[in-house]
Image (spheres, grey):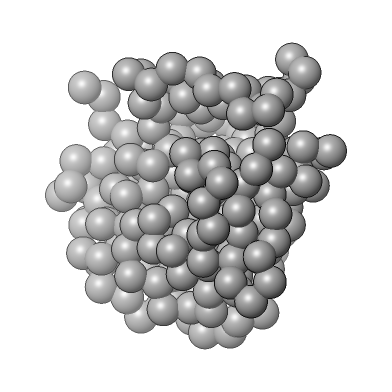
Amino acid sequence: MDKKKILVVDDESRMRKIIRDFLTKNDFTVVEAENGLQAVETYAQQRDIALILLDVMMPEMDGWDACREIRQMSGVPIIMLTAKSDEQDELLGFELGVDEYITKPFSPKILVARVEAVLRRSAPQEEEACVDAGGIIIDHPAHMVTIDGKPVDLSVKEFELLNYFVEHQGVALSRENILANVWDYDYFGDARTIDTHVKKLRAKLGEKGDYIKTIWGMGYKFEC
């Protein structure tokens, strides 16, 4: 089996080396970039990159702008790394389609575990068939969503969120429940960050976004 390729983007060479060493020991292939501009160029040239670890504060092009550029090309999983612990930064990351958000300093072992978890969630499940939820077609083998034959460009997290809603049609789901099941690790941030994902998912689904009902003071319910 080919090793999965991870792009590590950080302007600190020492940080890149620490991450590279742990990923390499866990059977990943690592490519590096020292700023956002290099990250965008590297990803454009190497589209077999399976996941990107992207620092926020960097010269030439910061992580936010790099994320925006990469999201124009692909829904490749992105984990943002930052020294700042700020709710607004976290919300911005989710709005840009970031799949995970890790604050420095962090345990390299935990980082590797997060990388493996994101890759598992983003991998197509070949044993599953397509699902039709009120005209929203979820193709699990292709990890694709279409409406009226037109593809809907969802991030990995948005795809997982939609799939979780569809699997639990008619069930009232709290924000905490959604985070515990879609984010498969202990989440210490504000549970209201789920609202950002739901808002973007609704917008991308167009009229069918109305299937996601808000339950005020609790969470959401999917009904079609």
Image quarter (top left, top right, bottom left or bottom right) of the C terminus = top right
Residue closest to the eye, 153 or 57: 153
Q: Position of residue 96 (x, y in %)?
A: 68, 56
Which of the 4 image quadrants contains residue 14?
Answer: bottom left
Whether residue 53 is situated above or below residue 189 in the rendered picture:
above
User: What residue lies at 51% left-to-right and 27% top-to-bottom?
Assistant: 143
Q: Residue furthest front?
A: 170
Residue closest to the eye, 138 or 15: 138
Whether residue 113 is situated above or below residue 207 in the rendered picture:
below
* Left or right of 215 in this view: 207: right
Q: Position of residue 11 (x, y in %)?
A: 50, 67
Q: Position of residue 58 (x, y in %)?
A: 60, 69
* Left or right of 156 in this view: 200: right
Whether residue 197 is situated above or below residue 162 in the rendered picture:
below
Which of the 4 image quadrants contains residue 65?
Answer: bottom right
User: What residue lies at 69% left-to-right and 61% top-to-bottom?
Assistant: 214
Whether residue 12 is situated above or below residue 155 in the rendered picture:
below
